[in-house]
Image (cartoon, grey):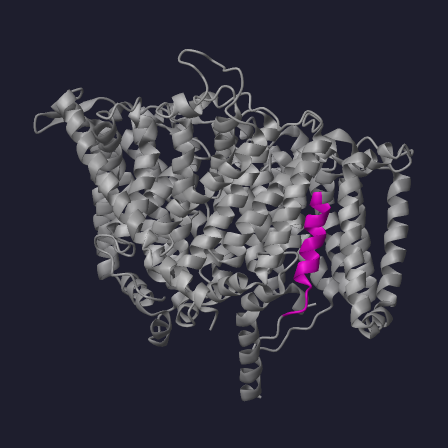
Amino acid sequence: MRAALSRDNVRAGLIGGVTVLYLALVGMIERFQDRDVITDVIGLGTLLILIGLAGTGYMASRPPKPRPGRKPVTANPALIGLVAGTTAGVLAGAVILILELLISAGVDVRSVLASVTPGMLSTMEFGLGPVGGALILVGLGAALGAGAGALRLLSDQLRDTVTFTLTAVLLMSLMEPILSAVLDGLSLPDRWLYEGGGLTVLGAVLTVVAAGAGRWFWKEREPQRKEAVALLPADRRTLYRKLAVFAAVAFLVVLPWLVGSFISDVLGTVGLYVLLGLGLNIVVGYAGLLDLGYVAFFAVGAYATGVLTSPASYLVREEGQLFAEKGLTNFWVALPFVVLIAVIIGILIGAPVLRLRGDYLAIVTLGFGEIIRTLVLSDWLAPYLGGAQGLLNVPPPPPEALDLRAPQNVYYLILVFCGIAAFVAWRLSDSRIGRAWAAMREDESVAEAMGVSIIRYKLLAFAMGAGVGSLGGVFFAAKIGSIFPNSFGLLVSINVLSVIILGGLGSIPGVIVGSAVLVGLPELLREFAEFRLLIYGAILVAIMILRPEGLVPNKRRQRELHARDAEAELSVIVTDEATS
Amino acid sequence: MTAPATSSRRLRFERLPLRRIILISLSIAIVYGVVAGSAATLRMGTFTAADWRSLVINGIARGSVYALIAIGYTLVYGILFMINFAHGEVFMSGAYTAFFVAVAFGRSGYLNAHPLVSIGAILIVSMVTSTLVAVILERVAYRPLRGAPRLVPLITAIGASFFLQYTFRGLYGAQARAYPTINVLQGTWTIFGVEILRTQVIVVVAAILLWIALFTFVAKTRTGRSMRAVGEDREIAALMGINVDRTIVATFAIGGALAGAAGILYVFLFNQVIFTMGFFPGIKAFTAAVLGGIGSVTGAAMGGLLLGVLEAVGPNLFLTGVGVPSPNQLQPVVAFGILVLVLIFLPGGFLGAPEEKRA
């Protein structure tokens, strides 16, 4: 008991309580409550509170890291979880109670804390009023904390199954927009699974049973399966891998016809970010140059397409006329020129600054991005680039049959170019150039001493990134049909950077996963849209601290990033041996 | 190694000094543009001497704000060698939080009855908030990453910057808000026969006082000495009995406090707060820090002033004569252009140590 009451546990509880309060005070809990996880049973906001409280217990009860010279404290994890969870609940409950008291005393809390709305308070109180709410927060904190701590007592297999099942329910519910569209597309009934934006009770029970049983048996047979895979002859393994890739491609091709036009449109946007991500991945992931002004090339691509193909472009328009008969040329003729222009601009921007050290380079590229945005927005260049009004009437690519008003066709067009870019990136990564980049990224001086021409390879990476980024701009222009300067802010660069960092620097599947999660999800779940950048920021910080190699790591990169940990572990072992 | 044909082609490519050609043409273009543009503007005579003077004073006032923020960048860079990209948000957090104190004072009439006390209180709230945010930022986001490859903390800092911006948006709301007016600060004073806005005088004086306080602190106190020692060599400093963690926290705290003060001075000049207000001053202050030589406190002050003046005068002076409409729209181009040029031609800044080969 004494051990469970340690300062560390109380501190973990306080951190948990602050986290729950944070989620409430920035407005997430109220906004997310609009989405049902299980219709009429639990909303996402409530679930967030519960996850916060349970997570406190789970984190507090995690086995302590071995530290040299310190004996690990042993206590019952359920007790630890109980203490931490209760602390969190008490803190959250107390603050909510104080807010309620202030409001009833006539203080206008909302004029300062904009998110302290009646809706937020009632969600936090589970609709039980101030005192009941505070009590239930304490009670839930205790129960969930203890329960989450008790998970540590279960066998690995059982614990894994429980957490997997709970995650599966949450994911099934969040996938509602996609899955119900797929079921509709296949003209299957979906009312048994989803209702009013969340899972039905039946759907939730089925998910629990299916996910729980599936995971249990998957884990049960894991050793045999691994053995079987290890015994497979090499050629069979490559065959299976090829089949898997083929199946994935086939899936991507039929996908838009399953999900209908709204989700196809979202898929098109995801594809656009995959393309941008693949380009930035060459610069940041392969060559190790942090480029924060990537949006510059996106803008160059879009504006160059506009100027070359729009009938409103200054190249074809007569003095005083708004539109000419038609643009200078068509989309497909313009495409290579646009990429060429972007590559040249990339070299012009890159050549003077690539000598700079990494962090300075990042800031300089950020500066270039902002310069380009300011320029396209300015009155000075307005006669050429449209200024604040933007460039209108960018015609879709010919022929007519490639009807880009259908989002499915946009998706296919982008898919093809993503495929090409992914193939090029994949082939590059193991080529002589890719190896030069890797050497440069790991240690510039050593690479230079080994005969890698640093400037040349940096320029090459920069120019290739510029080219692919401008392709993104080209499709953006074709997809939207008009170009507005506000689409080209720093946020685009940050979005793309977040995508490749979440997915894993240097990893091609990572780019796809990153775009699906960071671009696709917020488009589908409108509740997220408001907190998009908050979540991006949190992800960038969390990934860098907890898992710098990303979700789908590139093997080599992972080893680079964990070289330090391996050394640290070694030193712990050595000091342990020395002290014992 | 490879076939002779390829190697000779590569040689020819390398003999072409692409980088140097671009650099030289860039500098020629810029020098020509600046000289010709300024000459044309002066010949046109659109601006009177009084106009130029007020532009310069305006530039000095905003430059002193940049200088105060820049000190935060410089101190942190000096000991951790990382760009604290979220420093602009530290600046925003103080000014935005103090806004509510100012409104409360303004509503009760206390603000104009006791302006000195209320401004003091607002300043303290702002400085305390910014200090707290800076310290928490260090503890949560940067401390776990000490010794990580250089780009890792920078990416973290960018993430933290957006996280803080949108946290404050969630907490306080998305709209821009105007600070209540303080009557004492309205109007002008005549100094050496020149009429200057009172706010501008106060901002400059306050910035100078704060800068002197900081300079004395870093030069004279024990903490200041440990800061310099940790910047010199962290391991040796630790061996000499300096608590490195505490010193780093102190550095963030001092930078945060100055940013908080800068936030209030900024509000004196521009009179409004919004959750995005930290971004541009942050970047410009970073530019100022680089301009003066990152790591140097005096450099940060000089860089800030120079950047403020260039930004206020530059677009009008260089661009009006060339016939660019509404040149002040292009202010960011001037600021970022200076940043780019300084980093290319003078990466050490004016007062910085010459760029170390490898850190």
In the image, A17 versus B311, the foreground residue is B311
Magenta: main secondary structure equals: helix
For residue A242, which quarter of the picture? bottom right
Confirm whether residue A497 shows in the render: yes
Q: In the image, what residue occupies the spot 39% across and 49% down?
A: A350
Spot occupied by residue A89 in the image (x, y as percentages of width and height): 67, 49
Q: Is residue B238 above or below residue A106?
A: below
The magenta stretch is A48-64
Is B5 rendered above or below residue A199?
Answer: below
Residue A208, compared with residue B174, is above or below; it is below
Give the residue at x 66% y 47%: A419
Residue A507 position by quadrant: bottom right
In the foreground, A566 or B133: A566
- Residue A49 in magenta stretch: yes
- Residue with the most extreme left position: B192
* Percent coordinates x, y for residue A40 in the rendering: 83, 34
